[in-house]
Image (spheres, rainbow, N blue to C red):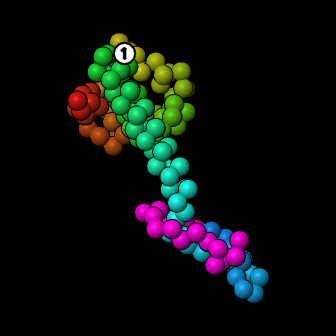
C-alpha cells in the first residue's frame, strides 16, 4: 500500500501500517482508522458485553462462580486465566462451580483477586 493510501477515517483507534513511500521504501505510517474495521471491532465488543451480562445472570442465579464473570469481564479465556493462576485448565474450570468456589482457600481467592486487580470483597460479590 502506498503511504497516501493508508486509511485515515476519523476513529478513536490508531493503527500502525507498513506502506511504501514515493521512493519505494517501506515506512511505518499511523492510521487514524478505517470505518469497516471500526464497525467490526465495535460489534465484537458488543458481543463480549452481551456474554459478560449472560454470565453475570448465571452468577446471580448461582449457576457459576464470580470467577467466570471476572474472567469474561477481563476478556480472558480459560487458558489465559489458568496460566495466570498457575494451575491446569480443568482445575480453574472447577472453580467456576459455586460449591467449589465457596470452599476455596483464602490464598486461592486472594490470587484470583490479584489476577483480576480487585479486592476479595469484590471477588465474592459481583455488582448487581
Residue 50, horizontal then vertical, whole percent: 40, 34
Q: Residue at x 52, y 65 (%)?
A: 33
Q: Is residue 104 visible?
A: no
Identify the image quadrant of residue 2: bottom right
> Mark 1, residues whose alpha carbon is within 10 Å: few (<14), some, or many (≥20)?
some
| Magenta span dominant secondary structure | loop
Q: Is residue 5 above or below residue 44?
A: below
Q: Which residues are magenta?
A: 1-16
Residue 107, horizontal then vertical, whole percent: 34, 29
Considering depth in this image, is 115 or 68 the residue closer to the camera?
Answer: 68
Looking at the image, residue 35 sits to the left or right of residue 125; the answer is right
Q: Residue at x 30, y 26 (%)?
A: 106
Q: Residue at x 53, y 49 (%)?
A: 40
Q: Residue furthest bottom?
A: 23
Residue 15 falls within the magenta-colored stretch: yes
- Which residue in the protein does label 1 denote? 63
Q: Is residue 60 above or below residue 37?
A: above
Amino acid at each position: 500500500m502506498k503511504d497516501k493510501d493508508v486509511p485515515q477515517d476519523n476513529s478513536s483507534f490508531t493503527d500502525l501500517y507498513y506502506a511504501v513511500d514515493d521512493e519505494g521504501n517501506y515506512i511505518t505510517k499511523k492510521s487514524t482508522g478505517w470505518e469497516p474495521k471500526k464497525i467490526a471491532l465495535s460489534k465484537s465488543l458488543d458481543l463480549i458485553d452481551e456474554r459478560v451480562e449472560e454470565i453475570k445472570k448465571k452468577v446471580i442465579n448461582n449457576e457459576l462462580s464470580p470467577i467466570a464473570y471476572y474472567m469474561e469481564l477481563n476478556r480472558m479465556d480459560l487458558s489465559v486465566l489458568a496460566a495466570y493462576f498457575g494451575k491446569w485448565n480443568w482445575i480453574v474450570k472447577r472453580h467456576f462451580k459455586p460449591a467449589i468456589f465457596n470452599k476455596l482457600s483464602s490464598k486461592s481467592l486472594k490470587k484470583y483477586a490479584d489476577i483480576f486487580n480487585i479486592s476479595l470483597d469484590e471477588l465474592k460479590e459481583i455488582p448487581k
